[in-house]
């Protein structure tokens, strides 16, 4: 608890009122007497203010909330002193917690309690905290006050917004169609026998079951469905390249949205989902667990993940994946596809995983780069266009090297990356590659 003396906004007005007689009586004695009187009144007001030692606080804060949603934090103020506590209370949440009414007037009679509600609408993921509560208690005249700061820590976990949730129903519907609503005519190592049905135009003749056809006296084909219980590993890059903002949001937020949508869809498909947030060390991890809780676990793990201003250690990451992945898996990298020029080690590290696993690299494309490349009217724009063209060429070169190694490379705008990645996952399943 920290004690300070505060003065009211009424005090300057009271001082000015005392100076009015100077217009009629030009004696400095009047000013001195009035100022002394004001000082005595302020001192008496501070002394007569309620004692803060009688105040206690109890917080009730929700455990978590999704980004952009609102919750109410309640603060119960109890006055165990002998005087009514009148004044202002400031519930000091950090700005990104989005507290809209955290400064309120209070009037708590002796022996009574008051419940104050503060609406929180967070603007950032992670733990939003409140460290203290500041109370300014005024005396009867409202000229002076005792201001006290109490330690009262609180925390609210803010989960990712998951705006991409709106794309989930349509992808789940397509998944159900692949699994049983319609035949899958492509057979691969990621498909298994489902059932028999009558041949229709357009079916692959390689799917004809000749023994069943002989027994039924009509052409019968086998249908295949994607195998379940596959392993899907989602790697979210948290290095410095995830920090730049594209379309007014960090790349990392787009990666988080894409990871959540893919995790939810893969869980619906019966696959085992694992999540790793990595730069040079593991920042968050979700191991394969109960499929019904995968989305909650991934959202909770990614809630506090922020970009770190270091280079990603791709060699260390791929070595970690090799030691932990003993069976064929789908490994999805959510990262920037524009690697430093000449850095063959990164491309080799990612490409080497394709010998044992199916690898997808998804990145955010920046529309501003294409815009800069098209504007060359002035010398300054020409330099910007040259830099943009260099970035585009580096991206194309890196994508070409990765694709030649068997990596599936895709790039999309922030709002389109999550559905594009989920569609790619479904396409790989439909082709029997997973």
Image (spheres, helix red, strand yellow):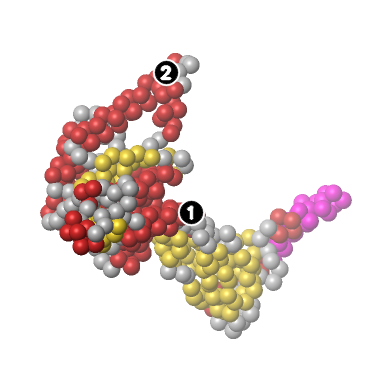
Residue sitting at the far front: 217
Q: Determine the image quadrant of residue 288.
A: bottom left
Identify the residue position indicated by label 1 in the image. Answer: 123
As displayed, is residue 154 above or below residue 409? below
Inspect the magenta stretch and tell me whether residue 170 lies in it: no
Q: CA distance from mark 1 to mark 2?
A: 37 Å
Q: Position of residue 116 (x, y in %)?
A: 58, 71
User: Residue tagged by mark 2?
Assistant: 382
Q: Residue at x 58, y 75 (%)?
A: 115
Residue 409 seen in this snapshot: yes
Q: Residue at x 13, y 44 (%)?
A: 355
- Stretch in magenta: 15-41
Q: Is residue 28 magenta?
A: yes
Q: Quadrant of residue 145?
A: bottom right
Q: How many residues crowd around disc 2 within 10 Å: few (fewer than 14), some, or many (20 or more)?
A: some
From the top left corner, tell me how far across and down residue 268 is, in percent: 33, 62
């Amino acid at each position: 608890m920290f004690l300070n003396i505060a003065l009211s906004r009424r005090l300057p007005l009271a001082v000015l009122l005392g100076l009015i007689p100077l217009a009629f009586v030009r004696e400095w004695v009047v000013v001195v007497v009035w100022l002394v009187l004001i000082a005595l009144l302020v001192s008496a007001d501070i002394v007569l203010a309620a004692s803060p030692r009688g105040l206690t606080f109890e917080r009730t804060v929700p455990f978590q909330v999704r980004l952009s949603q609102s919750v109410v934090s309640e603060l119960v103020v109890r006055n165990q002193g002998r005087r009514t506590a009148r004044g202002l209370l400031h519930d000091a949440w950090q700005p990104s917690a989005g507290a809209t009414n955290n400064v309120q007037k209070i009037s708590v009679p002796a022996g009574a309690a008051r419940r104050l509600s503060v609406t929180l609408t967070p603007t950032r993921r992670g733990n939003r905290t409140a460290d203290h509560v500041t109370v300014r208690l005024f005396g009867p005249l409202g000229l002076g006050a005792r201001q006290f700061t109490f330690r009262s820590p609180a925390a609210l976990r803010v989960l990712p917004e998951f705006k991409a949730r709106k794309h989930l129903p349509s992808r789940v519907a397509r998944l159900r169609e692949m699994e049983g609503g319609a035949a899958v005519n492509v057979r691969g190592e990621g498909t298994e026998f489902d059932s028999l049905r009558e041949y229709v135009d357009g079916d692959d003749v390689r799917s004809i079951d000749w023994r069943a056809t002989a027994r039924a006296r009509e052409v019968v084909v086998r249908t295949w469905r994607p195998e379940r219980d596959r392993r899907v590993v989602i790697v979210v890059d948290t290095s410095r390249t995830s920090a730049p903002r594209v379309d007014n949001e960090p790349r990392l937020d787009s990666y988080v949205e894409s990871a959540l949508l893919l995790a939810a869809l893969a869980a619906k498909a019966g696959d085992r989902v694992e999540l790793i947030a990595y730069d040079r060390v593991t920042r968050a991890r979700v191991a394969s667990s109960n499929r019904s809780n995968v989305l909650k676990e991934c959202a909770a793990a990614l809630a506090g993940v922020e970009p770190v201003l270091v280079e990603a250690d791709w060699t260390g990451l791929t070595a970690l994946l090799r030691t932990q992945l003993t069976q064929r898996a789908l490994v999805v990298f959510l990262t920037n596809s524009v690697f430093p020029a000449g850095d063959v080690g990164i491309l080799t590290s990612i490409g080497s995983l394709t010998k044992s696993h199916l690898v997808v690299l998804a990145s955010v494309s920046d529309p501003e780069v294409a815009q800069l490349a098209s504007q060359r009217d002035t010398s300054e724009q020409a330099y910007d266009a040259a830099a943009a063209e260099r970035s585009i060429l580096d991206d194309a070169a890196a994508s070409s090297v990765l694709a030649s190694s068997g990596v599936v490379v895709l790039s999309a705008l922030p709002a389109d990356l999550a559905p594009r990645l989920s569609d790619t996952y479904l396409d790989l399943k439909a082709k029997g590659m997973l």
